[in-house]
Amino acid sequence: MQDNYDRIKADNAEIFAISIQDVPATRITVNRENLEFPVLSDTNLDAVKPFNVEVPVDTGALNPSTFLLESDGTVVWKSIDTFDKRVPTTRIMKELSKLW
C-alpha cells in the first residue's frame, strides 16, 4: 500500500494501519518499512473490536485485514486474510477505485 500512497492521497482517501503492538514497537515497524501513512497502536484492541478481526491464539497478532470505509465510517468493502494469504494490493486498489 505504501507504493500506492501518493495516488490514494491524491484521490482524497487515506490509509490507516492498526497495530496491536505498543507504541515503541509500532514505531520500529513504521521506520523499518518506511511507512508514510498513519499507523496506530491499539494494544487494548479498542479500535479493532468493532470490525470483528480475530486474534488467533497461537500468533498473538491480528489477522491481516483491509477495510474500505466511507467518510461516515460505513464499511463498503473488507477482506479478512491470513498471514500466508493476503489480498493483493491490486485488488484493494480496484475496490477503492469504485468509490472514486
Image (cartoon, helix red, strand yellow):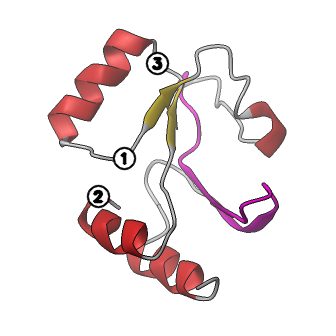
Which amino acid, mark 1?
Phe
Q: Which residue is mark 3?
A: 21
Quarter of the figure that contains the N terminus: bottom left
Image spot of residue 45 (x, y percent): 69, 22
Q: Are marks 1 and 2 in contact (CB under 8 Å)?
A: yes
Q: Earlier in the sequence, mark 1 or mark 3?
A: 3
Above-or-below relation of 97 to 73: below
Q: Residues within 10 Å of mark 2 (few under 14, many from 20)?
A: some
Q: Which residue is mark 1?
A: 37
Q: Residue at x 62, y 88 (%)?
A: 98
Q: Earlier in the sequence, mark 2 or mark 3?
A: 2
Specify whether 33 is left or right of 37: left
Kindly state the secondary structure of the residue where label 2 is placed.
helix
Which amino acid, mark 3?
Gln
Q: Which residue is mark 2?
A: 2
Picture quadrant where residue 99 is located? bottom right
Specify whether 33 is left or right of 92: left
Kindly state the secondary structure of the residue where label 1 is placed.
loop
How far apart marks 1 and 2 lie (CA) works out to: 7 Å
Q: Which residues are magenta?
A: 59-79
Q: Residue at x 54, y 51 (%)?
A: 82
Image spot of residue 11 (x, y percent): 46, 76
Q: Residues within 10 Å of mark 3 (few under 14, many from 20)?
A: some
Task: Between label 1 and label 2, give the one nearer the viewer.
Answer: 1
Q: Earlier in the sequence, mark 1 or mark 2?
A: 2
How far apart marks 1 and 3 lie (CA) works out to: 17 Å
Which amino acid, mark 2?
Gln
| Circle count | 3
Q: Tell me, yes or no, whether the highlighted magenta stretch contains residue 74.
A: yes
Disc assigned to residue 65: none
Task: Between label 1 and label 3, give the one nearer the viewer.
Answer: 1
Kindly state the secondary structure of the residue where label 3 is placed.
loop
